[in-house]
Amino acid sequence: MSEVYAVRRARLRERCAAAGSTAALVSRPANVRYLTGGAPEGAVLLLGPDEDTLVCPRMPPGDQPERRPDEHLRLTVLPTSAGDPAVAAAGVLASAPARSHGGGSLAVEEHHLTVARHRAIGSVVPRLHLADLGGAVEQQRVVKDEEEIACLRIAAEIADQALGELLESILVGRTERHLALELERRLVDHGAEGPAFATSVATGPNSGRTGHRPSDRRVEEGDFLSVSLGADYRGYRCLIGRTFVIGTSPADWQVDLYDLVFAAQRAGREALVPSIVYRDVDRAARQPLVAAGHAEGLPSRIGHGVGLEIDEDPQLTPAAMGKLDACVPVTVGPGVHLPGRGGVRIDDTLVVRPEADGGPELLTITTKELLAL
């Protein structure tokens, strides 16, 4: 895998050189991991013209091979309480011979650095202009290689297993909070590093809400139960969302609402083809809900990219202008919430594939049938 990280860094170095920067300082944790393979919390990567240096606040763990940084990197471990790794990395560059950076510019991730850190870095390298690296690494991360997709596939399998086991247990009388904690425990039991995000369990009038925080409300007969969870496997994160009915006979309004959201979600999934404009995927899933009179209160987006973060580019929103590429993993998750009654959300993680390869690859495979639990 070290060759993969070297290629990623070389691609970023070429982009920086084209923009006139002789070096780059990467500080956003997911970006550091993407370019190095693994690093302790707080580590930064200095991408230099001659060599690349990983500056760490402590020694990387030796008992987790999948979290070890690329062996081709120069490793600098700071003494205890030695200060900011980003400032220390700038010091490494400042101490290099002038010919190494030629008094040019250092590209930094301004969207991640605080003003104070930016100023501190500038004071260490006064001869260099601090340029903005922008979202260069995030843009590189959008299209995943097959190794990354394999990690996402395993993360989805873990989430499917955890959810499937929960559905086999007794739910009536248990609180949303208790069910969310149990799901997160099951994720770890099945091999996840942890949950990909804070697990959401919503019952009754809470169901169908975006980002609902589990409460002490207890599950009751006749409730909608909506669940949103994901697993973190080797840093890669997926999302699955499902809605069920508690009891044996869902009400007519529950069946109708579920069928509507299911049709919208299917339209969004089927729209995932290479070269489609992001907003057209959103429109495909949103239009059936708007036509049914649910324009008010719909989420601001139908889906988004996933990977080393649970919320990455691309953003599938009504105004998004970019186009999907093959091998881009995204979520598709429309939902409708009726105040005081509850609602439905259905989320999947998929990988965009060309039609010749079978079309979009569904990673989260738990049934979307309206089950009565």
Image (spheres, grey):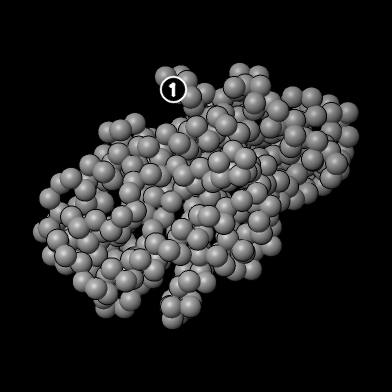
> In the shown orientation, is residue 288 left or right of residue 104?
left
- In depth, the one of 78 and 19 nearer the eye is 19
Name the residue beneath numbered marker 1. Answer: 64
Residue shown at the point (31%, 55%) measured from the top left: 369
Residue shown at the point (21%, 48%) measured from the top left: 167
Residue shown at the point (11%, 59%) measured from the top left: 173
The quadrant the N terminus occupies is top right
The image shows residue 265 at horizontal and vertical percentages of: 45, 60
The quadrant the C terminus occupies is bottom left
Residue shown at the point (18%, 45%) measured from the top left: 168
- In depth, the one of 112 and 271 nearer the eye is 271
Name the quadrant containing residue 280: bottom right
Residue 347 appears anywhere in the view: yes
- In depth, the one of 29 and 37 nearer the eye is 37
The image shows residue 294 at horizontal and vertical percentages of: 43, 78
Q: Secondary structure at mark 1?
A: loop
Examine the rendered structure and indicate whether residue 268 appears above or below residue 104.
Answer: below
> In the shown orientation, is residue 111 left or right of residue 310?
right
Residue 82 appears anywhere in the view: no
Looking at the picture, which amino acid does disc 1 mark? Gln
Examine the rendered structure and indicate whether residue 94 appears above or below residue 244.
Answer: above
- In depth, the one of 21 and 360 nearer the eye is 360
The image shows residue 317 at horizontal and vertical percentages of: 58, 65
Number of callouts in the render?
Answer: 1
The image shows residue 91 at horizontal and vertical percentages of: 71, 34
Examine the rendered structure and indicate whether residue 71 appears above or below residue 290.
Answer: above
Classed neighbour count for the residue bearing mark 1: other residues with Cα under 10 Å, few (<14), some (14–19), many (≥20): few
